[in-house]
Amino acid sequence: MEIIAAACRTIARTGWDSATMAVIAAEAGYANGALKPYFSTKDDLLAAAFDHVYAQTGRRMAAATIGKHGLAALRAYCREILPLNDTTRDEARILVPFWHKGLTTAHLAARHEHAIREFRTQLQHHLTEARDAGQVRTPIPDHDIVGHLITALLGAQITATLMPHLETAHTLTAQLDSFLNLLTHP
């Protein structure tokens, strides 16, 4: 939907506070007030933007892991969460204010929890494949590895948004690869 795409572009470009309903309506080519029938509040629009980002990320993850197994699939899956290009950096700029609003808005927090549970399930699937193939030999429990990956991936969205000159595609990829390499050692 063009309204959601306009909201995503606006939030990524100007930030959540500056992305008023009127500005988003103008970005979508609508008159002020035209969004009300679709989104009664700005928080509803933020929830829709989150759902959009989540769906886009899921499609990329599915495409990136086709034909891959074990550590290769785990790496490909994780790379789709990392802010490595303009698209994923813009998505991170949408997620950061979403998380802030989720701290005090139960339905937003529930959306985030659902997404993370799905990410955890997929990470565990790829990690299990890697262990079964003998690629992962660390004694660290899978639950801890998955937790670390979630923390690192979400943290990367924050640091790359706030310090893009330090957290580049190169550094983020090197961090991921270094961690995954550690998993191959007993």
Image (cartoon, rainbow, N blue to C red):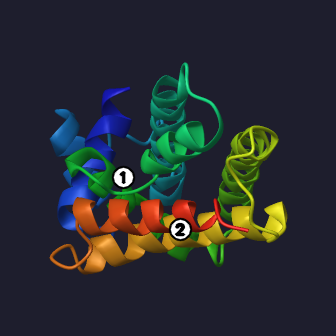
In this orientation, which residue lies closer to the viewer: 45 or 66?
A: 66
- Name the residue that disc number 2 marks: 179
Measured from the top left, where is residue 153 in percent x and y?
A: 51, 64
Q: Percent position (x, y) of residue 60?
A: 45, 31
Where on the picture, by quarter, is residue 87? top left
Circle nearer the N terminus (1, 2): 1
Tell me if residue 164 can be seen.
Answer: yes
Label 1 belongs to which residue? 91
Q: Is residue 171 above or below residue 119?
A: below
Q: Gap in Å between the C-alphas at discs 1 and 2?
A: 24 Å
Q: Please state if 101 lies on the left or on the right of 173 as rendered.
A: right
- In the rendered structure, find residue 131 and report the number of the disc placed on it: none
Query: Element at badge 1?
Result: helix
Provide residue 64's location: percent of width, then percent of height: 46, 30
Amino acid carrying mark 2 in the image: Phe
Identify whether 148 is placed above or below 71.
below
Quadrant housing residue 31: top left
Q: Between residue 99 and residue 87, name the one nearer to us.
A: 87
Q: Residue at x 29, y 54 (%)?
A: 84
Q: Report the amino acid beneath label 1.
A: Glu
The residue positioned 78% from the left and 47% from the top of the image is: 131
Q: Nearer the viewer, residue 52 or 38?
A: 52
Q: Secondary structure at mark 2?
A: helix
Q: In the rendering, at what x and y percent does residue 156 appear?
A: 42, 70
Residue at the limit of the structure toward the top, as seen here: 67
Identified at 66% across, 70% down, the residue is 105
